[in-house]
Amino acid sequence: MAQVAAYHRPQDLDGAIELLARPGRTALAGGTVLNADREPPAIEVVDLQAIGLDGIEPAGPDRVRLGAMVTLDRVAGGADGLIPGWLADLARAELPSTLRTLATVGGTVAAGGGESALLVGLLAADAAVEVADRSTAAAAAAAGGGRPLADVLASGLAPGSIVTAVTVDVAGTGAVATTGRTPADVPIVAAVAVVSADASTRLALGGVASQPVLADPADPTARLDPPGDFRGSADYRRHLAEVLSARALEAAHG
Ligand SMILES: Cc1cc2nc3c(=O)[nH]c(=O)nc-3n(C[C@H](O)[C@H](O)[C@H](O)COP(=O)(O)OP(=O)(O)OC[C@H]3O[C@@H](n4cnc5c(N)ncnc54)[C@H](O)[C@@H]3O)c2cc1C
């Protein structure tokens, strides 16, 4: 368990932003990462559960807005048909049910897990991340449509900032192809392809870099330099990326 030196529970976003603006404080969402952290030093946590970031709503004709505190279990449940089946399946596969009821969309983005197949799916779904901090009023953050998830993964979040929501394209046809040591294990490589309503194609890959990346559908392995580890060498991962990209693209194009 993490050593928690102080616990704050703001009642609105402005309060959370003020609390997190002070050094040494950390946002607490589902706690699946934070509570598993055994490293000192003790942290002061700012619990985001009471500030109203748990909505799921349409955001225009083709997109859905997932509040940062929406749990992976709710995404896996499909939100009354708002979330496409392929994305719901990725959320279901991400964690066991006990942890899915805790882990959140915002926590998944902020943690930026290199092995997260759900993050690969969010990238392919053209995810935009709404972020609020002292310099950005919440309304302005939402109105601005958010930063591309690829940018957030590349540059990280500024200290004290809060992911408030993630919007995704839900009108496209998505397909997932993965290879893991077992069907339930974290994929060694994951490929997700989405053909959007305007017929453009997005392809995202996981397990080929320190974080999920967007790839060129016409040449998925161009410029890939995967790290090798005990689950797969660099060459094996590059080979998987080629094969799984082809499968995902073929399935997404129907
Ligand atoms: C047993 C186990 C298995 C796991 N398996 C996987 C896996 O297969 N794939 C994978 O990718 N991950 C895995 N994880 C990691 C983790 O479950 C996910 O990254 C999870 O989605 C984190 O969400 P959370 O809400 O629990 O985040 P928390 O633990 O609450 O927070 C994680 C980090 O994100 C920050 N944060 C959270 N919410 C926000 C926000 N709204 N704005 C700004 N910062 C925020 C926190 O400050 C903290 O630094 C696993 C974890 C455990 C314990």
Image (cartoon, rainbow, N blue to C red):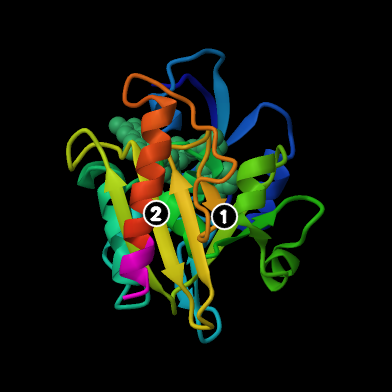
Query: Whole-percent x and y of residue 24?
Result: 67, 26
The correct choice, above or below, for 178 with respect to 77 in the image is above
Label 2 neighbour load within 10 Å: few <14, some 14-19, many 20+: many
Q: Is residue 194 magenta?
A: no
Disc 2 element: helix
Dominant SS of magenta comes to: helix
Highlighted magenta segment, given as a residue range: 249-254
Q: Which residue is mark 1?
A: 11
180 or 148: which is nearer to us?
Answer: 180
Q: Which mark is residue 236?
A: none
Label 1 neighbour load within 10 Å: few <14, some 14-19, many 20+: some
Q: Nearer the viewer, mark 1 or mark 2?
A: 2
Q: Is residue 55 visible?
A: yes
**Considering the image in quadrants, where does the N terminus appear?**
top left
Query: Whole-percent x and y of residue 182?
Result: 17, 36
- The amino acid sitting under disc 1 is Gln
Disc 1 element: loop
Query: Whole-percent x and y of residue 25?
Result: 64, 31
Q: Going 52% across and 35% down the picture, which residue do you hit?
A: 209
Q: Quadrant of residue 19?
A: top right
Q: Going 48% across and 45% down the picture, which residue do you hit?
A: 107
* Disc with the residue nearer the chain's start (1 vs 2): 1
Q: Is residue 67 visible?
A: no
Q: Which residue is mark 2?
A: 245
